[in-house]
Image (tube, grey):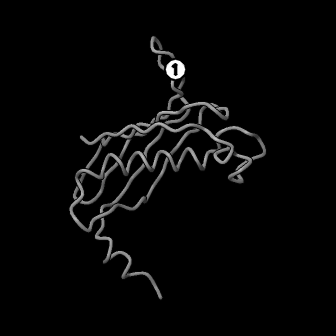
Amino acid sequence: MDEASLRFTVTDADTALAVGSGSLPVLGTPRLLAWCEAATCAALEPSLQPGETSVGTRVDLEHLAASAVGGTVEVTARTVYADGRLRRFAVSAREVGAEDRPGRLVGSGEVTRVVVDAERFLGRLPR
């Protein structure tokens, strides 16, 4: 099964205040979701054929804990289901903790993506 982990540092631009999802200077849920989708893309990338990409079709995400500006979050995506073009990923986000202990869970959920031919997909858009 495909898996990828990406690390991100929370900046002022990632806060709920900055992304319009609240008034606090902590990691905003829309940014956490974007990071989860980035991890799913990274997990899927090695198996894509030339001209293929993937599009997100469904998300179920729980944002469980606040993360302060300056904190580091590691997001992991692991394929849990694959059928033809459909891929379903379990995603989790953890604060990066000390060497001897894992960081606390910031978010978890599931992201579904579908593999598509990029040109064909874009060609279907209304003009």
Q: Nearer the viewer, residue 13 or 88?
A: 13
Q: At which x and y percent is residue 122?
A: 38, 77
> Left of 70 or right of it: where is 114?
left
Label 1 amino acid? Answer: Gly
- Classify residue 62 by image quadrant: top right
Q: Please say if 119 is above or below 65.
A: below
Q: Please say if 39 is above or below 68.
A: below
> Left of 108 or right of it: where is 20?
right
The residue sitting at 43% across, 81% down in the picture is 125
How many numbered dots are placed on residues in this image?
Answer: 1
Residue extending furthest toward the right: 23
> Left of 95 or right of it: where is 21?
right
The residue sitting at 31% across, 77% down in the picture is 120
Residue extending furthest toward the top: 100
Q: Which residue is mark 1?
A: 97
Q: Count residues near mark 1 (Cα–Cα under 10 Å), then give few for <14, some for 14-19, many for 20+.
A: some
The residue sitting at 41% across, 45% down in the picture is 39
Kind of element beneath mark 1: loop
Q: At which x and y percent is residue 112?
A: 39, 52
Q: Please say if 81 is above or below 127.
A: above
Q: At which x and y percent is residue 23?
A: 78, 45
The residue sitting at 36% across, 82% down in the picture is 123
Quadrant, the N terminus:
top left
Q: At which x and y percent is residue 59?
A: 48, 51
